[in-house]
Amino acid sequence: MSEAPSYPVYIPKTFGQILDRVFRLMRANFKLFVGMAALPPAGFYALFALISVAILWPVLQALPKTPSPDEVIHLLVVGVPLMVVLTVAYLLVFAVYLGAASFAGVQADCGAKITIRQSYAVARSHAGRYALLLFLIYVFCFFPALIIQLAMFAGIGLTTLHKAQPNPAMVVLFPLLSVLQMAALIVGLIIGLRFALAFPASVSENLTAWQAIKRSGVLCRGAKGRILLVLLVIYAATYLAMLVLMGGAAMMGALGFLVFSGMHLQPSTPTIWGLGILGGVGFLAVMVLFMAASWAGYVTAFAVIYNDQRLRIDGASANAPGLGTSA
């Protein structure tokens, strides 16, 4: 009598087991995951600060004089295109990060030791693919919201450039467009659940952007609710941690103010500027840390769910993603 091939019995992970696995991976690879996720926002905020100072420097030098309408228009004409270029550049870098983080997350879930350099090397080799994949996801999910946003900006821009009083129709349409945009964003996020596993699928299975979109649709069947719940838990955890840290920072600031007031100290203008800059840098550092921790949690969750869904759908005999290999 022939014997059936003996494959390891795979038991699909429950919601709690997925969360536990994500927590364990984050704890064991905190420096790796958060360090990778911190690079894109840190670079973005640094460039944003430099561009903002360069654009606003004439206005800052003229303080406390109020900028004229012409100066405000000039700032908008110069600043808005630069911010658009910076945002596009950030999205390209972010796409590479998603590829690198997905590779690291999938490999870590399979028990491999991966470095930041190895992960980004894999992602850079297919940077165009990941940029196209992120672009397609944004188009499918948020194109209506983007159109509404551009319409709102166009109305504000035309009113500002022509120095005209707000059109009564705009006064009515602007709140309506805001509500429609919020609804479009919510619908886009729901649609985005279908593409949650596109990046780990593209990285692990060497799929093109369009193939990864279709593969994610297959892998997410029956898992969208579980994916949403996992993301909500991660969001709630990071949001609660941010509230606690911000509350502590506010208390320390209030205590410092009371100490200065009680001692009747009169800090000089350079001291005030120095404290303001130090506070701004500290605030941005905290924001980068929380953004990095949030995205590290999300991408790790996608990696764990990807491995789980791949075994659920393809069977326990499916080959695991190649450990330590590039996509």
Image (cartoon, helix red, strand yellow):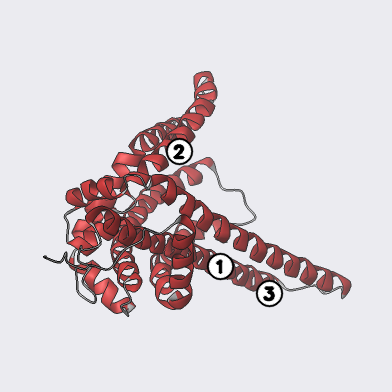
In the image, farthest residue toward the top: 169
For residue 286, the mark is: 1
Amino acid type, callout 3: Thr
Indicate which disc residue 271 carries: 3
Q: Which mark is residue 186?
A: 2
Along the polypeptide, which appears first: circle 1 or circle 2? 2
Q: Nearer the viewer, residue 276 or 30?
A: 30
Residue at image coords 45%, 48% = 228
Which element is circle 1 on?
helix
Disc 3 on helix, strand or loop? helix
The answer to whether residue 274 is seen in the rendering is yes
Q: Please identify, in this view, whether the residue under mark 3 or under mark 2 is nearer the observer.
A: 2
* Residue 113 rendering spot, x and y as whole percentages: 32, 80
Look at the picture and state if 324 lies above or below 307. Answer: below
- Residue 217 lies in what quarter of the image? top left
- Residue type indicated by callout 2: Ile
Residue 22's image quarter? Answer: bottom left
